[in-house]
Structure formats: structure tokens, C-alpha cells
Image: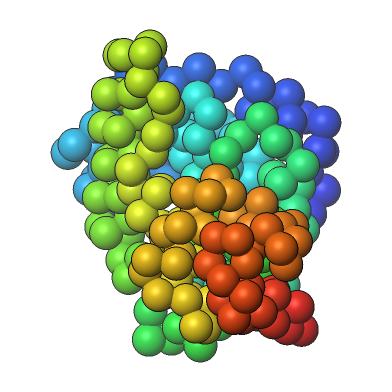
């Protein structure tokens, strides 16, 4: 059934999501799960029958996909769904990936596809309880931003996740990774930047390292 998800329906659904401040909207499949029980101790959880590919909406414009341990092991079956979400550009997407001793060997492939091919931020989580903590932080950050219309929208946990993923590029330290994000603004822009644009920010050697990593098959 998941493989037959209608793209137009998914896009329309994400456009109509309206998340009340201090709440999170979750797919029904997470009701009565460990993640649900951990989450409801910190935020108000509302359930929807059909969120398409998205598992959680901490805000109206932020969609979170949760990849379980089995999802990572059989990741090829998840790629089509994530690619569909990429086309629904109304939603800023974050992927929480359940990285355990069993699924850890599959995590690099998941990270590379989500980050480099789709431009999604990927956050590894060892348990559903840890995932609930991150989702709660997202709700709190979104709530503070929404109450002040003069503040530029910023998701602090997501910003740290982006920094962590960029730092995974060989040859980049924290300083250069942060400079790239501050200078180019997003993973997508880093992937599409020219050698010259990268060199201006992190130098010629750093630019070569980034391009080599991005072009690696």
C-alpha cells in the first residue's frame, strides 16, 4: 500500500497541516508505542489517520520521518517514499534514524541518500525514548519562534543536526562545517555549489574534499 502512495494527495495533505503551538501531530501507527508514551509526558500529542510519508509534525512546516531499525536494514524499500516527500517541498523534512548495534552498519547508506541525494537532515537515535526527547525539543523551539513574529524561524535541534552531518565530510572540522552552513544556508546549496563558491568559504583544499565526497559513488 505504501508503494502506491499518491503524490498529489501527499502534497495536498502537507499543505493543510495546522499544528497548534505546543502540540505535535503524529501518525496513528505510533499510538500506544514507547515513543508515544515518552512524548506525551512533555507535549500534547494529536493523532491523524493519514499523514502520508510523514510520521510527526512538530510544526505546520516541519515534517519528521522516523526510520525504525527494520527500516534501516531494508532501506531500499524506503527510498521511493522519501523521494516523494522531497517533491512535496511545502515541508521541511527531518529524518530520525534508529541506529542500533544491529542497524548501525546500514546507517551510512541511509545518511548519504537522505543528506546528499535529498537534502534532508538525518539524526541518529538509539531508542524511541531518545527520539521522543528530540521531537519534544523541536516542538518547544517551534513554539518560541511562533510567538515572536520578529524572530527569524530557526529550529535549534535541526541546526545542530545539520552541523553534525556536514562534519561527517572527511577533512572538515567543526569550524569549516559551520562556515559552510552559515555561508550557503542548506545542505542542498552545499551540494550544488561550485568549486569557486566552496573555495571562498573553506579554501581550495577544503572545497576539493567536499567535491570528492559528494562525487563518490
User: In the picture shown, does residue 203 fall above or below 60?
Assistant: below
Q: Is residue 63 left or right of residue 109?
A: left
User: In the picture shown, does residue 47 fall above or below 85?
Assistant: above
Does the rendering let one see residue 168? yes
> Residue 170: x and y, percent?
52, 83
> Residue 192: x and y, percent?
74, 57
Task: Please say which color scheme the image uses.
Answer: rainbow
Residue plotted at (72% across, 36% down):
88
Q: Is residue 65 left or right of residue 25?
A: right
> Residue 101: x and y, percent?
38, 86
Residue plotted at (24% across, 37% down):
40
> Residue 74: x and y, percent?
64, 76
Residue plotted at (33% across, 43% down):
156
Along the viewing direction, whichever of 93 and 178 lies nearer the viewer: 178
Along the viewing direction, whichever of 31 and 203 lies nearer the viewer: 203
Quarter of the image for residue 110 reads bottom right
Numbered-mark total: 0
Name the image quarter holding the C terminus: bottom right
Toward the left, the furthest residue is: 41
Q: Is residue 16 left or right of residue 156?
A: right
Residue plotted at (40% across, 75% down):
173
Along the viewing direction, whichever of 32 and 133 lies nearer the viewer: 133
Along the viewing direction, whichever of 86 and 145 lies nearer the viewer: 145
Does the rendering let one see residue 191? no
Q: Is residue 178 left or right of residue 7?
A: left
Amino acid at each position: 500500500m505504501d508503494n502506491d502512495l499518491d503524490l498529489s494527495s501527499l502534497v495536498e495533505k502537507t499543505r493543510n497541516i495546522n499544528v497548534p503551538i505546543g502540540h505535535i501531530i503524529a501518525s496513528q501507527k505510533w499510538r500506544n508505542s514507547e515513543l508515544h508514551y515518552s512524548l506525551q509526558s512533555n507535549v500534547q500529542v494529536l493523532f491523524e489517520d493519514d499523514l502520508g510519508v510523514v510520521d510527526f509534525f512538530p510544526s505546520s512546516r516541519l515534517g519528521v520521518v522516523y526510520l525504525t531499525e527494520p527500516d534501516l536494514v531494508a532501506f531500499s524499500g524506503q527510498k521511493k517514499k522519501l523521494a516523494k516527500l522531497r517533491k512535496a517541498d511545502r515541508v521541511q523534512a527531518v529524518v530520525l534514524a534508529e541506529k542500533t548495534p544491529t542497524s548501525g552498519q546500514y546507517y551510512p547508506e541511509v545518511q548519504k541518500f537522505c543528506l546528499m541525494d535529498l537534502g534532508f537532515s538525518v539524526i541518529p537515535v538509539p531508542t524511541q525514548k531518545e527520539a521522543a526527547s528530540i521531537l519534544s525539543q523541536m516542538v518547544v523551539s517551534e513554539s518560541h519562534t511562533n510567538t515572536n513574529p520578529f524572530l527569524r524561524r530557526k529550529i535549534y535541534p535541526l541546526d545542530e543536526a545539520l552541523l553534525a552531518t556536514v562534519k561527517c565530510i572527511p577533512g572538515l572540522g567543526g569550524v569549516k562545517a559551520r562556515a559552510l552552513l552559515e555561508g550557503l544556508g542548506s545542505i542542498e546549496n552545499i551540494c550544488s555549489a561550485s568549486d569557486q563558491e566552496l573555495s571562498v568559504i573553506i579554501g581550495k583544499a577544503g572545497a576539493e574534499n567536499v567535491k570528492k565526497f559528494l562525487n563518490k559513488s
